[in-house]
């Protein structure tokens, strides 16, 4: 019989700080996804599901309206910075899901951005600002690339770290947006 010895390593204060920051970031993302699911589920004819962790290769949220033949896959990003990025592989996984449900007439990949009402200006230092939400529709005829949305709602792409002009259209969501949203088309 073999015995296994588990050694407990000391966690440095630096590691603990990074773990706390990472946990806070995940909680923000979960809360935004949960908010979207609740908004859809509060509507007649809509059903939304949070699909799980990022390691499962699933979209963040799946929304269905069987009466109107609509399916959305949503990649949700939330943060305190001045820009939020959706990596291309997350757009690909959303596209894969919407493409597989051909029975739906309307199949959209939506990028949902939420800029929190506090802006990070330093380590643990924030300033108040207006909360903003943007819902951008991805054109599935395009080759997916990393997409960045800025606090003012302007979007652009990143290819090998170089900025590319890509203007994504705002999507009119079927629910009332409770917070400020600027419209850039």
Image: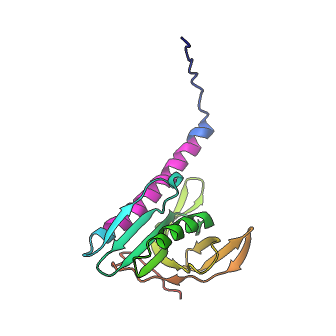
Q: Per the image, is 34 magenta?
A: yes
Q: Residue at x 39, y 80 (%)?
A: 173
98 or 46, nearer to the observer: 98
The residue at the far front in this view is: 103
Residue 105, image x and y in percent? Answer: 41, 82
Q: Is residue 6 above or below residue 185?
A: above
The residue at the far top in this view is: 1
48 or 69, nearer to the observer: 69
Q: Per the image, is 132 magenta?
A: no
- In this rendering, would 49 be left or right of 165? left
- In this rendering, would 37 be left or right of 120? left
Q: How is the structure coloured here? A: rainbow
- In this rendering, would 67 be left or right of 115? left
Q: Which residues are magenta?
A: 17-38
Residue 82, image x and y in percent? Answer: 58, 69
- In this rendering, would 101 be left or right of 93? left
69 or 14, nearer to the observer: 69
Residue 91 seen anywhere in this rendered image of the structure: yes
Q: Residue at x 57, y 17 (%)?
A: 5
Residue 157, image x and y in percent? Answer: 66, 75
Q: Is residue 125 above or below residue 165?
A: above
Residue 112 seen anywhere in this rendered image of the structure: no
The residue at the far bottom in this view is: 185
Residue 182, image x and y in percent? Answer: 48, 83
Q: Main secondary structure of the magenta part?
A: helix
Q: Residue at x 41, y 83 (%)?
A: 172
Q: Residue at x 47, y 70 (%)?
A: 100
Q: Is residue 8 above or below residue 109?
A: above
58 or 78, nearer to the observer: 58
The residue at the far left in this view is: 44
């Amino acid at each position: 019989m073999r015995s296994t010895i588990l050694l407990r390593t000391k966690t440095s204060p630096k590691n603990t700080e990074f773990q706390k920051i990472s946990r806070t970031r995940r909680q923000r993302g979960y809360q935004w996804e949960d908010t979207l699911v609740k908004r859809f589920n509060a509507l007649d004819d809509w059903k939304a599901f949070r699909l799980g962790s990022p390691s499962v290769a699933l979209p963040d949220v799946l929304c269905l309206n069987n009466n109107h033949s609509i399916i959305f896959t949503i990649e949700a990003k939330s943060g305190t910075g001045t820009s939020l990025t959706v990596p291309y592989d997350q757009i690909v996984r959303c596209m894969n899901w919407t493409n597989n449900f051909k029975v739906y007439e309307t199949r959209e990949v939506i990028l949902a951005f939420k800029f929190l009402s506090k802006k990070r200006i330093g380590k643990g230092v924030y300033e108040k600002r207006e909360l903003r939400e943007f819902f951008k529709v991805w054109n599935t005829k395009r080759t997916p690339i990393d997409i960045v949305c800025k606090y003012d709602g302007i979007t652009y792409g990143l290819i090998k770290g170089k900025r590319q002009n890509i203007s994504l259209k705002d999507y009119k969501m079927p629910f009332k947006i409770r917070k400020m949203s600027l419209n850039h088309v």
